[in-house]
Image (cartoon, rainbow, N blue to C red):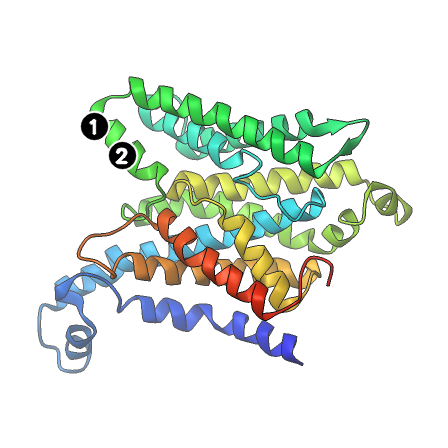
Amino acid sequence: MKKRIISISIYVLPLPLILASLFIGPSQSATPEAIFRAIFYDTGNVSLIHSVLLDVRLPRILLTFLVGGSLAISGCSFQAIFRNPLTDSYILGLSSGAAFGAALALAYSFLPVQLSAFLFGLLAVGLSYYMARKNKNVSIVSLILAGIIVSGIFTALLTIVQFFSDPFRLQSIVHWTMGNLHNASWEKLESSVIPITAGVFILFIFRWRLNVLALGDDEARTVGINPERDQLIVLIAATLASSSAVAAAGIIGLYGLIVPHIVRMLNGPDNRQSIPLNFLFGGAFLLIIDDISRTIAGFELPIGVFTMLIGAPFFIFLMKKTNIGWNS
């Protein structure tokens, strides 16, 4: 009963949170009081308030929700197919690979940002998996070490791109690598929504298979599932979703590790339920963090900083408060 209440709460949470976030922001021209007066009394600068709400805040809110949801659902999927609770896009090197690809596209415009981020993100995950695989087995330690090595390689390549970039483009790349949503717009949302939605939709369809894949290849074959084929499909879908999120918002470190564990502790390990819950909770949680990052000070702080400053203590609190974990 408790888990059912938690699940219903997570399903209901996003819509009121999105509406509430429209009233949150540093603009003095679109405070809650000014919005209330413009709606009910038709006073104040209505056109300015309309522009702030629909052209500035709304695309940022929707993009933040999509980015948070895609990182969370990708992290949950990676943990299932690799049977490793310490796996996420950041640890596997996907974030660094996608960051290098996106920075390369931003600096030299040889490929679209989304496509470049996806290709190099997929390359990073493939390299990590290939390096860690031995005798058809992938150990936890080998995968983590391989991910660290691959991440270091692409981080070094990213530094080289920054070193040779034009100063004006360098500034945008540096801001972007810290995890930032201050440049969110309808155009960026439109370029991100299709690949993110495609990746999330595939992961949603395969959510029940993730339970079988998490048991091992032999168990999957006994029920008629081709584990290599399904793992490849899930890997590509998760990479598409998370690399598109990185291309849109930059590097948001370890978010795909923290959120799946939180959802698992709250609702259990069944991927049939946790996949949609990860998307909704991940989007809502990142939206809360973004609301704090753009209102806590007179200037905006990178959201990538807050994902650790807020997410890590919250994760520790839940670990201490409940005994539910990976094996529950």
Viewport quadrant of the N terminus:
bottom right
Is disc 1 in contact with disc 2, using a CB cutoff of under 8 Å?
yes
User: For the view shown, which residue lies furthest in the left direction?
Assistant: 44
How far from the left and from the top, in percent, is residue 14? 45, 68
Give the residue type at disc 1: Phe
From the viewer's perspective, is 141 left or right of 156?
A: right
Circle on res. 251: none
Q: Relative to residue 111, is residue 48 drawn left or right?
A: left
Point 24% across, 21% down: residue: 166
Give how far across and how far down residue 319 sits, in percent: 58, 63
Furthest residue toward top? 164
Please determine whether, in this image, residue 215 is positioned above or below residue 102: below
Front-most of residues 94 and 306: 306
The residue identified by callout 1 is: 168
Camera-nearest residue between 87 and 213: 87
Q: Residue at x 67, y 53 (%)?
A: 205
In percent of width and height, residue 63 lies at: 39, 52
Query: Which residue is depicted at the point 36% across and 48% down?
Result: 305
Residue at which label 2 appears: 172
